[in-house]
Amino acid sequence: MNRAARIALGLVLCTSLAACGGGLFGHRDKKAPTAKQLAPARITTIGVNAYLWRATLDTLSFMTIAQTDSNGGVIVTEWYVNPAIRTERMKASVAILDQELRADAVRVSTARQILQGGQWVDTSVQAGTNQKLEEVILQKARDLRRNAAG
């Protein structure tokens, strides 16, 4: 399966992580480092940016990972049932699209289902969920890069 097909599959599989709790979306560091303080933005011992890859795995660490492809840049989770809301489950797919640490290099797609009459039924995802997850991943990747510079 080529990269575009994997990305399309990941995007189709997923659309909400809305019920995962407020702590997931963190806060932003206000202090901007200078260029000399940063590690290189392009770390590619795998097929994609290593900072984005690690940040994605960290961000989704509360979910079971179903599939990873570090060369193609795809991470797909299993369905996750929040213990506080057992009638709802979520699934996420992340595509890392570039070897550079850039804002447009990560795409998140989430899916949400609710339990109705003993059957899982697809339902809408809270607006902004995918964008918020992308922002969290990007911020974590930037932090990893900053910390790598020492």
Image (cartoon, helix red, strand yellow):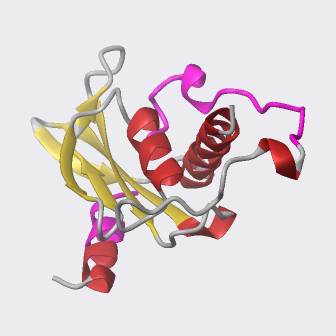
Residues in magenta?
A: 9-33
Point out residue 54 in the picture as x, y percentages from the top left corner. 44, 43
Residue at figure coordinates x 66%, y 27% from the top left: 26
Q: Is residue 18 left or right of residue 81?
A: right
Image-quadrant location for residue 71: bottom left
Position in image of residue 113 (x %, y %): 29, 45
The residue that appears at 52% across and 59% down in the rendered structure is: 43
Count of marks placed on residues:
0
Q: Is 124 contained in the magenta span? A: no
**Near-viewer residue (44 or 130):** 44
- Let me know if residue 22 is in the magenta part: yes
Side (left or right) of 116 relative to 109: left
Q: Judge whether 86 appears above or below 116 on screen.
A: above
Residue under the point 49% across and 42% down:
55
Inspect this view and state whether residue 55 appears: yes
Q: Residue furthest left?
A: 118
Between 144 and 14, the residue placed more toward the observer is: 144
